[in-house]
Image (spheres, grey):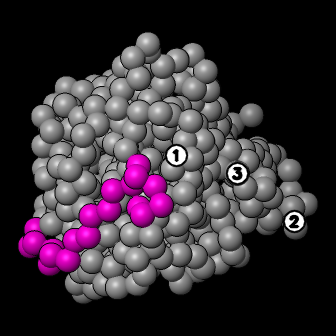
Amino acid sequence: MTLTHLDWLFISIAVVLAVCLLNLLANFAFAMWAMRTHKLMDEIPFVSVLVPARNEAHNIQACIASLLNQDYQNYEIIALNDDSTDDTGAILDLLAAQDSHLQVIHSRLPLPRGWNGKSRACQTLANQARGEWLLFVDADTIHAPNSIRSGVEQATGLRVALFSAIPRQIIGSWGERLFLPVAFVLIYSFTVMWRIYLLSSSRFGNAAAIGQYLLVRRDAYFASGGHDAIRDKILDDQFLAVLFQRHGYRIALTDADFVACRMYRGFHDMVLGLSKNAFANLNGSLVVSLLFVSALMLLFFLPLVMAFMDAAGGKAGIVPSASLIAVAFTITIAALVNLRIGQPWWNGLLYPIQLLVGIGILLNSIRWHYTGRAQWKGRTLEETT
């Protein structure tokens, strides 16, 4: 039987998705290995937990309360109220008065030109920290009692200078569910965690980190330049990982069941939050964005459309079979990732809608970039190349 070009196309799509599934399982295996095979060394290092917070009144109390309830004994917490216009500062002051582990810094200084707010806040916190390890966490995270201990155990066991973990995700509305799960499907499918750990190449694609939970060794942080060296980067976590690799430090990205995060509250908040960095995730390139959207259409939409068309027409053969296999691979990947991030498996069935919403967010991000409207929490975002 002679295979047509269309036959080969759908066979190739199914093969690519099979590789994505294998990579997903490899990422799960790497995370389990990192979690289970490394224990804390005899000496317990002092850890500074650093929490930048701007207009986080609805999150900050739960975050700090969980950090104050740790089974790790040798740590401090420093939170920065970054010129908030809500009750963030007052809540932090009240918590600090109740527990001496917490130190609060209030910053009312205008943002210097060339800095983004997150990097300036993180660098300010690091300058005040006394820890041998610096744990940067977002104010919308909630930590299990073993959060600090588990991070230090894995970082020291893996012998890395930067350790980052993908938290379990809290999704509280249908608006958030319309995109967030598929974002993690893309992360787990196309990020190769074991390669990031094993290879020390400083190319951007070889480095990845999640700012929601980012643990770094103090000496490596300051030797590489810290957030000062990436002061204008919107993707500060990603570029910090690149920075560490460029200075010869090994890094690791895995996932974690000891920290959870609710990134956004509702559809509008999600669109605003993701529009600020979606285009930056694709190197701020229209060509890369076009290729990315084309790849999404080819891998995830074309097989679905073909499967429906062939089912309606009662067709059989290589193309219908390959398209159905491709759809099955996609649903399996999406279901497994949703379970991994703490969401119901059936979220994976929504992937076509989620991808369309994601493409819309990317288009909005591109619009923001070229009209100078990219901002977050009242601050305009600018990035130099």
**Hey, which residue is sitting farthest top in the picture?**
42
Q: Left of 250 or right of it: where is 138? A: right
Please rate how many residues cluster around mark 1, counting C-alpha atoms within 10 Å: few if below 14, some from 14 to 19, many from 20: many
Q: Nearer the viewer, residue 187 or 151?
A: 151
Crowd tier of the residue under label 2, counting other residues whose Cα lies within 10 Å: few below 14, some 14–19, many 20 or above: few
Q: Nearer the viewer, residue 79 or 263?
A: 79
**For residue 109, above or below residue 187:** below
Give yes or no for contact between labels 1 and 3 (Cβ–Cβ under 8 Å): no
Residue matched to label 2: 313
Q: Is residue 45 left or right of residue 271?
A: left
Q: Going by the picture, which residue comes out furthest to the left?
A: 113
Q: Earlier in the sequence, mark 3 or mark 2?
A: 2
Q: Earlier in the sequence, mark 2 or mark 1?
A: 1
Q: List the residue tagged with mark 1.
A: 166
Q: Is residue 250 above or below residue 314?
A: above
Tag 3 residue:
342
